Image (tube, grey):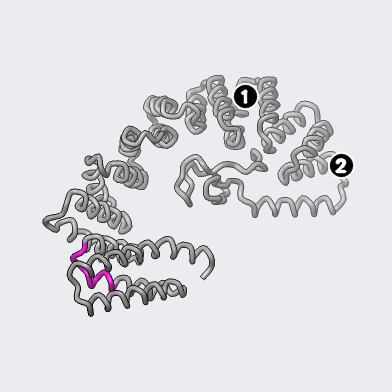
Amino acid sequence: MNFLDQWMWFVIFVPLAGLFGWVLGRRGGERHSGSQVNKLSTTYFRGLNYLLNEQPDKAIELFLHVAELDMETFETQLALGHLFRKRGEVDRAIRLHQAMAQRPGLSDAQKIQALSALGEDYMRAGLLDRAETVFTDLAKLDQRAPQALKHLIGIYQSERDWAKAIANASRYEEVTGEPMGKLIAQFECELAERHRSNGDAEAAREAVVRAYAADPTSVRAGIAEGRLETEAGNPLAAIRAYERAAQHDPDFLPVILPSLLENYDKVDERTGARAFLSGMCEHYRGIAPVLALTRMTETEDGVAAARQYLAQELKDRPSVRGEAALIDLTLADHANAEATLQDLKHITEQLLVRNPSYRCTRCGFGAKSHHWQCPSCKDWGTVKPLLNYAVV
């Protein structure tokens, strides 16, 4: 067992073992006979010994046995259900927590605990409609609202019910005071994309406006606005939207540049495009704006000028993609380039194929294409282009 596995077992089972030990001591003091207490104590310490000797499966079995010997204790049964869920025995966890929630004589706090555990069981089993019902009821109770609302937000994300996800995120912010604007803006942008796909540009624009209201610096809202303006035949408005998005977070520049340059071409505004790209070169250390300026230089001033510009820039910001572009320019400028130059280009291209173009800043997930929601950690807006990513 490696260090990470050891730490996970420590985090999960030591607190549970402590709980069983506490219950054992309390119940023993209340009414257990000496032999029963001794039996439970022996089982408890055997479980701890297994845990310390890196035998978690045997420890689990013994801790379950301790819990089953004391089925009248609410805390013990709650921990038992949690263990069932952790072991993948979700059906057993559901039956146990259902029975606990229906038990007469529970305090309000205990009933809430049992229902919350049952809702988590339903989510683990993929029964999202049942989980939604449980957490919707719990969200009406101030005592449990934040946790229930978090679960509901997760459910509605899975179901892509963005309107309900927005409503619950807004309520969560009201209840806890925790800002949810960035998440709500992502949901609004999902709605905007849906409306746009359905041909309802006006509804899409309204969703973008709401996204800006939730997060004034939303890059995704700027991209959505730029796309809508492009499709509506308003290239100047699209340019303003894309430029604003790039200024809010230059890390997304490689995603934005293709559409932005396309709109610059529509209005034949090369001076404005050059000025924007030059400004971005000062604030963004990636290679994308440099390569865009290199292509513009090649078109206007020729291959030799473009090669000279790129070679100079690569001294300050070396890049594999920049190197590949420089090789292309060198081959174009010298028809009889040596074979080693071709080999170098081939090797560089192979490196580009193997490397991801995007990476999640939260969990490190690497991807070849862009995702607004990270497929790994499920966080939003954290998958960004790597600094050496260029416009293709």
In the image, what residue type sits under mark 2? His
Q: Residues within 10 Å of mark 1 (few under 14, many from 20)?
A: some
- The spot of residue 129 in percent (x, y) is 25, 50
- The spot of residue 252 in percent (x, y) is 58, 36
The magenta segment: 65-73
- For the residue labelled by badge 2, is the local secondary structure a helix, a strand or a loop? loop
Vertical side of 366 occupied by 39: above or below: below
Q: What is the quadrant of residue 385 in the picture?
A: top right
Q: Badge 2 is on which residue?
A: 334
Q: What is the quadrant of residue 310 in the picture?
A: top right
Mark 2 and mark 1: span between their CA atoms? 31 Å
Q: Badge 1 is on which residue?
A: 264
Count of marks overlaid on the render: 2
Residue at image x 56%, y 27%? 242
Q: Is residue 91 visible?
A: no
Vertical side of 209 occupied by 32: above or below: below
- The spot of residue 179 in percent (x, y) is 41, 34
